[in-house]
Amino acid sequence: MQYMLLIYGNEAAMAASTVPQAEAYAPWIAYTKALKDAGVMVAGDPLAPTATATTVRNHGGKRQVQDGPFAETKEQLGGYYLIDVAGLDAALDWAAKCPGAAYGSIEVRPVGMM
């Protein structure tokens, strides 16, 4: 079954970090490698900062475009992994190992079948 691991964190705090880039990325590289080595990774990518977002609505047949994310929040969606595992327990195990769980949150959501 496929699950999305949605990675949330404080974008401003991450941008202000003084940790060298190579050191900051090392846990993510190791985690991605572990997902691939286990054969469960389908896809995954970081997202550009929320300042680059555009929100679109189509209410009453009229398109509305707004710069920025849909809502102001303390944590922003920073990236995702799409994994294929046996079930929710396995997805939760992988989410707990995600480096982002140490400073933010990981939302685990099954991919719906349409």
Image (tube, grey):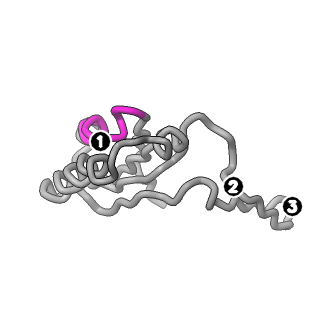
To which residue does mark 2 refer?
A: 68
**Secondary element at tag 3:** loop
CA distance separating discs 3 and 2? 22 Å
Residue 28 in the figure: left or right of residue 79 = left
The front one of 66 and 10 is: 10
Q: Residues within 10 Å of mark 1 (few under 14, many from 20)?
A: many
In the figure, is residue 14 to the left or right of 66?
left
Q: Which mark is residue 66?
A: none
* Lower sequence index among marks 1 and 3: 3
At mark 2, the secondary structure is loop
- Residue 2: x and y in percent read 33, 54
What amino acid is at disc 3?
Gly
Q: For residue 66, which quarter of the picture?
A: bottom right
Mark 2 burial class by Cα count in 10 Å: few <14, some 14-19, many 20+: some
The amino acid marked with disc number 1 is Cys
Looking at this view, is 16 or 27 the one in front? Answer: 16
Q: Are marks 1 and 3 in contact (CB under 8 Å)?
A: no
Q: Dot 3: within a 10 Å radius of its alpha carbon, few (fewer than 14), some, or many (20 or more) residues?
A: few
Residue at the limit of the structure toward the left, as seen here? 37
Residue identifier under label 3: 60
Q: Earlier in the sequence, mark 3 or mark 2?
A: 3
Residue at position x 25%, y 42% in the image: 94
The three-letter code of the residue at mark 2 reads Gly
Q: Main secondary structure of the magenta part?
A: helix
Q: Look at 72% across and 62% down and name the residue there.
A: 56
Q: Which residues are magenta?
A: 91-103
Residue, disc 1: 98
Q: Are marks 1 and 2 in contact (CB under 8 Å)?
A: no
What kind of element bears circle 1? loop
What residue do we see at 69% from left, 49% from top? 70
Q: Position of residue 28 (x, y in %)?
A: 28, 50
Residue 41: percent from left, percent from top: 25, 58
